[in-house]
Image (spheres, helix red, strand yellow):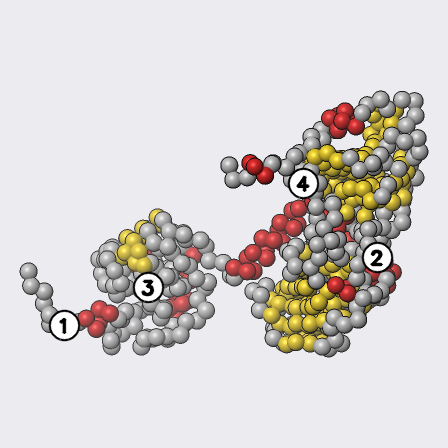
Amino acid sequence: MATLVAGANAALTAENPGLDHVVVGMGWDSIPSNGPQAELVPFALMCDASGEAVSNDHLVFFNQLVSADASMTFVGDGDQEQIDVQLGLVPAEITKIIFLAYVDPEFRGQGTFGSVRSAHIRVATAENRELVRFNLGMDHLESVTAMIFGELYRHRDDWKFRALGQGYSTGLAGVAKDFGIAL
Amino acid sequence: MSVPTTPRPDITWLRRRIRPGQAPAAPTAAPAAAQQGTSLSLGHTSAPESTTPPAAPASLSLGHTPAAAPASLELGRPANSAAAAAPQGASLSLGRTTTSAPAPAPAPQTTQAPQAPQATQSAPAAAQPSAGLVLGGAAPASPLSGRARKLAQLREKSQREDHEVSLLFPAPGIADVYELNLTDRLLRLSPMQSSVGSLVVSGSTAVAWESVRRVTGGQTVDGHKAGTAVMTAGNRPLVGYHGRDALITLRHVRSLRRAIFINRSSSAMGVRLFSGQTVALPPAADGTQMVLLVHRVGNVLELRAEPVPHSWPDVQVWQEFDFSMTHSAPVSSYGR
């Protein structure tokens, strides 16, 4: 198991021959509250060579559990959110899969990542053998309302994982604008 | 009756699977013996980890016996490796049969002949249909681990969950409809629109909701409540009023079955999404009022305008749409 820092990458299929199925787990720990609190939503989107989401059918989150090509599936709905990726089924046009979480833009007060104490993303095999992990830095996130945790991307014939930890102060709307998602 | 205290000279051999110095069995003997064998196994039989197939025709053994013992009834648990899976001809097993994946090349523990020829011989025998009666948990061997199997089940469940959406007839989206009325009665939101932020309904005077667990409640814009509120993990109600706006918390849309919004005022009712897109419903006219029915189908919300007589009170509207308020059981009934 390797722990990455922001910006670092790790070879997945090159280091693990025969790996065609990974589970990407995202988790966080929020400061508990008795009142209304920020709700984080894990989200994955498939991008083509232009860097934009192929379509809204190529998103996976709690209300769209399977991608259009059935290569990505949202499994689990607890604190530990998991997205199942069958690498062999990912269409060739997909060059990267981005994993992020946004704070739900709730009408009664959205909240930010400021209430999140720790967060991580990890890539594991189907047997839950952890391949790589990235623990995000949680400082100065009071204005952050969406964050890209990491990405799976193609490198020649292989798949690699890159740790990112890139925050957005514009929330899901900013993410949608950057990646061409229709809200 | 006296018990002999002298150790039997052959006890060492009995405890071992294979007689020392015994020549390895001919590779072709195993499948043949397997087909002929009419063995009865009632318990735990620890099959040899080395892949010597037990040649036990018509065997009866009552404990851990050497696999090569003839005419034995076995009461052990057959922990079958690829080779042990071979003798399945007309056998009865009352123990839990733990099947393993096709022989991941077990390390030899006894002085045995090379395993490769035996493995190749046992494979066709394992493929033969068993004529035996197996009363234990003899699930077929699966190449997936427990966790991988669970993941596969979750994936299948996810793929099944929203399949009904693909069966729906085409309907306009919120961008296609300016007003829901008697002509344009219905619109359907996308999965994204149905799940981000809040669905805000302004101009309504009362709302009723029903969760997927059939928990039903209602509220008026003045704050009067009926039935049971549905609270979400974010400590907000699933449906309710915030000021004069009625809201559905779309982060938890999967908990919602349906909701109905009633407008008794003389102004129009409006629906607004996180994206800023809106649709309106006209106020009452000619003795008819429009109520807004929000219904979840799979992962999408359908917004439907339903005409009802303006004279109907809220309770009658609830009855018409089969909203039956639920009530929490009193604390005194706890534990009865």
Q: Which residue is mark 3?
A: B46
How far is the residue under mark 4 from the one under mark 2? 29 Å
The answer to whether marks 4 and 2 sit on the same chain is no
Q: Which residue is mark 2?
A: A181
Secondary structure beneath label 4: loop
Frontmost residue, B23 versus B46: B46
Secondary structure beneath label 3: loop
Sequence-wise, the earlier of marks 3 and 4 is: 3
Count residues near mark 2 (Cα–Cα under 10 Å), then give few for <14, some for 14-19, many for 20+: many
Q: Amino acid at mark 3?
A: Ser
Chain containing the residue with disc 3: B
Q: Amino acid at mark 1?
A: Pro
Count residues near mark 1 (Cα–Cα under 10 Å), then give few for <14, some for 14-19, many for 20+: few
Instruction: Return the x and y of residue A126 as percentages of the image width and height.
Output: 59, 63
How far is the residue under mark 4 from the one under mark 1? 72 Å
Instruction: Return the x and y of residue A49 as percentages of the image width and height.
Output: 82, 67
Horizontal arrangement in the rendering, residue B157 relative to residue A147 (left or right): left
The answer to whether marks 3 and 4 sit on the same chain is yes
Horizontal arrangement in the rendering, residue B96 relative to residue A67 (left or right): left
Q: Are marks 4 and 2 in contact (CB under 8 Å)?
A: no
